[in-house]
Amino acid sequence: MFGKKKNFNSARIDTLIGQGTVINGNLEFSGGLHVDGKIIGNVIAEEGSDALLILSEFGHIKGEVRVPNMVLNGEIIGDVFGSNRVELAPKSCINGSVYYNLIEMAIGAQVNGGLIHEATESTAPKRLENKSTAKAKQEEQHDAELATNGAVSASQ
């Protein structure tokens, strides 16, 4: 609404798993992955990549999903870990917990598990310093130095 929204619909898709395809085993990828079929196993993006998973309303994953960016509109049985952005479309159904940094959830999306926010370092709240206290301490030190210097010069 207020910031720039990354348009995932125009994202580059490197891998497509068609509607009649079933994969038994873990899937590791980088870039863009579009799933219309079924994956029985974990889906893991390459470490440190800016990968994108798009799970259509026809797609099913039974396993853990670890991808930085995802748009989900199908069914996942397992935990979901989105280190950057998770978008849950109206027909998405997650049977497991969703660990996210940023989340967008449409009306109709289901999460049968927990929603757990995990901030990254860049989005973690910064600890603010109380400048009025720090400034007061500085002034006290300055006054103490003046008093000490004044006492020394008065005694001379």
Image (cartoon, rainbow, N blue to C red):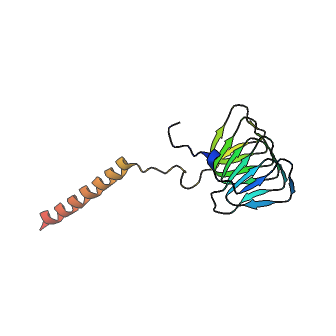
Residue toward you, 102 or 10: 10
Q: Position of residue 106 (x, y in %)?
A: 68, 34
Res. 148 in view: yes
The image quadrant of residue 109 is top right
Report the residue at 83% width, 48% height from top: 37
Q: Foreground: 119 or 51?
A: 51
The answer to whether residue 66 is above or below residue 71 is: below
Outermost bottom residue: 156
Q: Position of residue 80 (x, y in %)?
A: 74, 49
Q: Residue drawn at (42%, 51%), measured in percent from left and top?
A: 129
Image quarter (top left, top right, bottom left or bottom right) of the C terminus: bottom left
Q: Residue at x 76, y 36 (%)?
A: 91
The residue nearer to you, when weighing 31 against 75, is: 31
Residue 47 lies, in percent from the top left, at 67, 63
Image: 15 above or below 91: below
Q: Is residue 81 left or right of residue 138?
A: right
Position of 67 compared to 119: left or right? right
Residue 14 coordinates in the image, percent (x, y): 70, 57
